[in-house]
Amino acid sequence: MQNMLKFQIMALATPIDVRLITSRFGHLPATVATNLVQNLTRYFVHIASGFSKERPDSWVSQFRRGELVATDFSPEFREVYHLAITAQQETANAFDPFFDGSFDPTGFVKGWAIHQAFTTFLQPLMDQGAIIAAAINGGGDVQLGVVRQCDFVWQVGVEAPTNLNHVIHQYGIRNGAMATSMAKGSRVSVPIQCQETHRSLTQATVLTADLTTADMLATTAIAMGQSHFEDFVRTQQLPVKGLLVTSSDNLVEI
């Protein structure tokens, strides 16, 4: 039997839930746990302040006002900008970081930040043997990991688009990420420009190796629609799986 440590970081628009698993006879020293919480909080506050459209001094606000070019900004902003532009190009504008007329990475940053936090702060604890599994969850978008010598499996549920208390599918994941985007009514309201005359999807869940990609592809699926997205995944030979909820409430596995 394993032991679980849970805590929550309140820094982004969505609370960040962190879960750590130690072996039956193991424990995480209090100083390590305290330092982890402080480092994660400091990191997410830093990201939130840099990418907030509400803060006039944020990187995003300055860029949207045309005061500086992307190369003048922090490494974090430059990386997000590059990844967002690349995603826009690779999806033929289905993933559109300029959906409101100027650069807005709101729908991209959360998944990217969680993935970065997992890699920077949690993966080393697993590599050192301090924990055997870890997960960071932000509004249903989650990055997970388990050490190789452990048989633990994370159980992650997909919630119904119209009832967040109803789980419509469950996945067992050891290492990877899962992200969900909704056509409307999402926990974090990020407009998605639909490329269809009549929207065919109300929700898209994508599983892949990292949350940056999973989050981007879930948004892309809503924008493209069912048929176009299925063709896109097949043509690009993307290593993903997931669940699409159609406008008629059918469930389609990809």
Image (cartoon, rainbow, N blue to C red):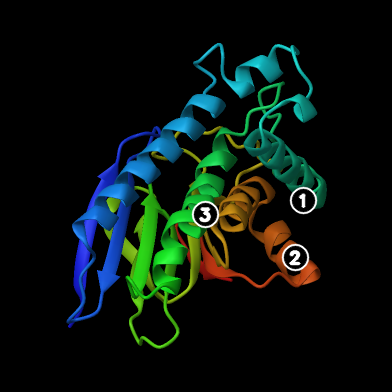
Towards the viewer: 101 or 160: 101
Q: Which residue is mark 3?
A: 115
Q: Quadrant of the C terminus?
A: bottom right
198 relative to 71, above or below: below
The residue positioned 64% from the left and 58% from the top of the image is 226
Which numbered dot is residue 12? none
The residue positioned 63% from the left and 28% from the top of the image is 104
Residue 73, picture quadrant: top right
The residue positioned 79% from the left and 22% from the top of the image is 69
The residue positioned 62% from the left and 23% from the top of the image is 60
Q: Which residue is mark 1?
A: 91
Badge 2 element = helix
Q: How far apart are the alpha carbons under marks 3 and 1?
A: 21 Å
Type of amino acid under label 2: Asp
Badge 1 element = loop
Sort mark 3 into few (<14), some (14-19) or many (20+) by Cα contacts within 10 Å: many
- Viewer-nearest of discs 2 and 3: 3
Residue 28 can be seen, yes or no: yes
Type of amino acid under label 3: His
Towards the viewer: 116 or 209: 116
Q: Which residue is mark 2?
A: 231
Left or right: 131 in relation to 126: left
